[in-house]
Image: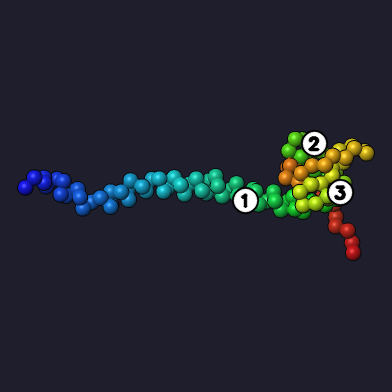
Amino acid sequence: MFITPAYAQAAGAGTADMLTSFAPLLFIGVIFYFLLIRPQQKRAKEHQSMVAALRRGDQVVTQGGIVGKVAKVVDDEEIDLEIAEGVKVRVLRGTISAVRSKTEPAAD
């Protein structure tokens, strides 16, 4: 008696209305994944494989812009970088931004 017909009709359409209101948000989330998150993950994976493949004699560039030659691979975290003749600097592997030239692997 106190419930109007408009209120009674709107009560049944709540789930479909909620789905259509969340559809644009889901669409934006999918776009963000394919345009931002996925390419960033791909770049990070490529950087990890590049850093893991460093060996003595490779000419590299650090994130700070220092160009040098890998003198020694110390461990999984650090390398010795020769930036001038007789001048060696120890840097973290993660700071290597590019490999300019690769050396050939040593023959067994």
Q: Residues within 10 Å of mark 1 (few under 14, many from 20)?
A: few
- In three-dimensional space, the C-alpha distance between marks 2 and 1, rounded to whole angstroms, equals 25 Å
Q: Secondary structure at mark 2?
A: loop
In the picture of the structure, the residue carrying the numbered disc 2 is 66
Q: Which residue is mark 1?
A: 42
Residue at 44% over, 45% down = 28
Q: Is residue 64 visible?
A: yes
> In the rendered structure, are the residues bearing label 2 and label 1 in contact, judged by CB atoms less than 8 Å apart?
no
Q: Position of residue 42 (x, y in %)?
A: 62, 51
Residue at 77% of width from left, 52% of height from top?
76
As drawn, is 17 to the left or to the right of 64?
Answer: left
How many callouts does the rendering have? 3
Q: Nearer the viewer, residue 33 or 101?
A: 33
The image position of residue 24, as x and y in percent, is 38, 45
Q: Amino acid at mark 2?
A: Ile
Dot 3 amino acid type: Lys
Q: CA distance from mark 3 to mark 1?
A: 28 Å
> What label does residue 72 carry, if any?
3
